[in-house]
Image (spheres, rainbow, N blue to C red):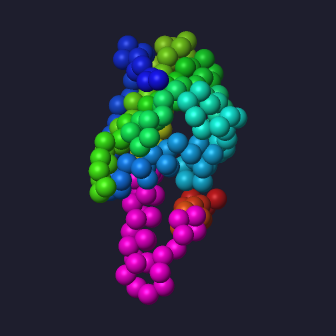
Amino acid sequence: MRMTILRNAPVVVDKEIEIFSPPEVIWHWIRRVDLWVDWHPEVSSAWFIDDEAVGARFKWRKKMLGVRCEIVDSASARRWAWKGRSWGVKARQEFRLDGNFRSTVLSSTMTLEGPTSHVLKPIVRKVATHWTEVWLGVLKTRIESQHERGRANHGGGGGTTPLAERVRRSVESERARLGL
C-alpha cells in the first residue's frame, strides 16, 4: 500500500540529503521506531504497539508532544511511511531512498493538516521543517560516522566491532556531547 502525499495540506515540508551508505542500512535505521530514542536527540521515547509491518501502530514522544501513529508504507530499502495525530494535527511522513551500494539520496516529505495546522501555520511549518532537518542531519552523521569507525577498525589489527557495540558507543558519545 502506498501512502498518498497530500500536496494541498496547509504544511508540506520536502527535504533530502545524500548519505554515503547503501539504502538497506538507512532503511533499517528509519523503520526501527523502538531505536529512534537511541539516536535522535529530540525523541524522548518511542515504542511499537504492534509488530513492524504495514498497519502496525506505534507511539513516540518529543517532550510533551505524544504522537500516535501507524505504519502506512514499507517497501524494503526504498520507502517507509507513517501517519499519526496529536494536538489537532494530522501528520504524514514518507521517506524515500534512492541509491546503490555506496550512496543514497534520502528524501522526506512531511504533511500536516487539521485545525492547529491552519491556525498556527507559520509556527507549525517552522517546527516541521526543523524536525525534518534534524531527522535527516542526525541520521546522516550517525550512519556515516559508523561507516568511518568501521573502516578504521578494518585497517588496524583488532578486527571489527559488532554493529550493536558501535551503535551503543555512538549513542553514548552523542549523549555525552548533549550533556544527557
Residue extent of the magenta highlight: 137-165
Query: Where residue 157 sits in the image (x, y, percent)?
Result: 44, 87
Residue farthest to the right?
49
The quadrant of the picture occupied by the C terminus is: bottom right
Query: Where residue 175 sits in the image (x, y, percent)?
Result: 59, 61
Whether residue 133 is visible here, answered yes or no, is no
Residue 74 lies in the magenta stretch: no
Residue sitting at x 59%, y 42%: 33
> Which of 159 and 139 lies nearest the eye of the viewer?
159
> Which of 27 and 91 lies nearest the eye of the viewer?
27
Residue 10 relative to residue 72: left or right: left
* Secondary structure mostly taken by the magenta-highlighted segment of the chain: helix
Residue 140 lies in the magenta stretch: yes
Residue 68, compared with residue 48, is above or below; it is above
> Which of 128 and 95 lies nearest the eye of the viewer?
95
Residue 171, compared with residue 135, is above or below; it is below
Query: Where residue 112 sits in the image (x, y, percent)?
Result: 48, 21
Query: Where residue 94 sits in the image (x, y, percent)?
Result: 43, 31
Q: Quadrant of residue 83?
A: top right
Residue sitting at x 38%, y 73%: 151
Residue sitting at x 43%, y 53%: 25
Whether residue 144 is visible here, answered yes or no, is yes
Residue 77 relative to residue 163: left or right: left
Residue 64, compared with residue 116, is above or below; it is below
Q: Quadrant of residue 58?
A: top right
Residue sitting at x 43%, y 78%: 153
- The total of numbered circles placed on residues is 0
Residue 137 relative to residue 167: left or right: left
